[in-house]
Image: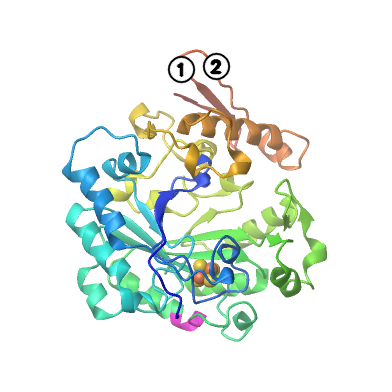
Amino acid sequence: MEKLNDSYGSPLGLTSQFRFCGNPFRLDFYKFCSFGCKYCFARHIGGQDDFDYSYARFDIIDNLFKKAFETSDETKNYIVELLRHKVPIHIGGLSDPFQPIEFQLKLNYKMIQLSNKYEYPLIFSTKQCDLPDEYFEILNPKLHAFQISLIGADDEWIKKYEDNSPSPTKRIQFLKKLRGKGFWCSIRIQPLIDLDKAIELCDTINGIANYVTIEHLKINTDNPVMKELFKDEINKYKRTSIMRNLELGKDEKIKDIEILKQHLTKTTVGVGDNDLHYLSQSRCCCGIDTIGGPFDNYLKYNLTYFTTEHLGDKKIDEEEFWTPKCNVANCVNGDVRIKNVGDFRDYVDSYCGKFNDFMCDGCSVKNKLNGISFNKKSGQKQKQFSIFDFGDGNEWSISL
Ligand code: SF4
């Protein structure tokens, strides 16, 4: 990696997903990923395809933690606010934190030390199949959790999609090792490409993984590698509201989820498809809400939390809905940015409204849900979101 450099300047921040996701505070020290999965969406947003081998200097993060915890200055930086509230950090949304370069640069090793110093919760997403002993010596099951990405259990089949990452067999051994050491560990089937292969995987890890997140494949039609890779399946995929992506129809996706749930009798299931989060068996589709302890500080003011209201206590404490006060417009992608809007809750409210229109616009799910309605009483201190009938016939509502 001759071009390796330390110019990556924004490793920590919120992703636009905060509108529907409780775990959007992300950290990636590496802007590239040498595992090079063929379906990887991150490769095409400044990842390894443009050979940008940059990584972040550790002092960027160290200084943010110092500002958050060793000063009491007022801040205009939402990152410092999130740190002070100890919102769990998700490491590995854009690149694998434990790809081979980590064991030379040890940036995530230092991050684990930093999280121990400030008792800060971290959740790592990885395809790695083991860690050196020195990592286990500083990892702590109370502060550190893992998600292992795996799309099937078949070592040969997976090579068509991933030819440079550890085999499924080794990743499943790693899952068992982490569980044996007391770490919370989920499996992310993301993307779900082949239902039979996913069933085989679910049968293997049922009752071993703490949680399984399922998210169907999206085919980015701007990406020739993806189009070629999925040329045999592409006819089944349809254009969605996100112009560049093709997806399976909603009914087909729901059927897959129901089948996989039947194979995961001893493991909780989350659904990562943006239109189907409400089918999750917990309040956050990555399962962070099921870990407990310091992870309970995940963000709750979002669509998935609202649409899984039927899973929780009907009475919700206002304090649970903590959100940052600082302007977050910078972390929203240009295509969803609203002119002169920087408030976290305004972005969430706007997204909920659009989702409501989408769900109630003649799609087949409408019949199953009998509609979802978010009624915002604007201009008043109280906002009211009402969510109707998730199968038990009761109306659920949240007053904010
Ligand atoms: S391991 Fe993750 S980030 Fe790395 S190439 Fe594969 S999907 Fe992308």
Report the predominant secondary structure element of the magenta stretch.
Answer: helix
| Count of numbered badges drawn on the protein | 2
Question: Would you identify the image quadrant in which residue 99 lies?
Answer: bottom left
Q: Residues within 10 Å of mark 2 (few under 14, many from 20)?
A: few
Label at residue 341:
none
Q: Camera-side residue: 93 or 222?
A: 222
Q: Is residue 127 visible?
A: yes
**Label 2 SS:** loop
In the image, taking residue 190 as reference, residue 321 lies left or right, namely left
Q: Is residue 150 visible?
A: no
Colour pattern: rainbow
Q: Residues within 10 Å of mark 1 (few under 14, many from 20)?
A: few
Q: Position of residue 305 (x, y in %)?
A: 48, 39
CA gap, disc 2 to disc 1? Answer: 7 Å
Q: Amino acid at mark 1?
A: Gln
Query: Split into 4 quadrants, where in the image is the N terminus?
Result: bottom left
Q: Is residue 169 magenta?
A: yes
- The response on whether ligand 1 sits within 8 Å of label 2 is no
Label at residue 382:
1
Q: Position of residue 218 (x, y in %)?
A: 67, 60
Marks 2 and 1: CB-CB under 8 Å? yes
Q: Position of residue 312 (x, y in %)?
A: 44, 38
Q: Position of residue 63 (x, y in %)?
A: 25, 52
Q: Which residues are magenta?
A: 166-170
Question: Would you identify the image quadrant in which residue 185 lies?
Answer: bottom left
What residue is disc 2 on? 377
For residue 381, above or below residue 83: above
Residue at the extreme right of the image, as rendered: 235
Residue at 27% in and 71% down: 181
Q: Amino acid at mark 2?
A: Lys
Q: Camera-side residue: 224 or 174?
A: 224
Q: Camera-side residue: 2 or 150?
A: 2
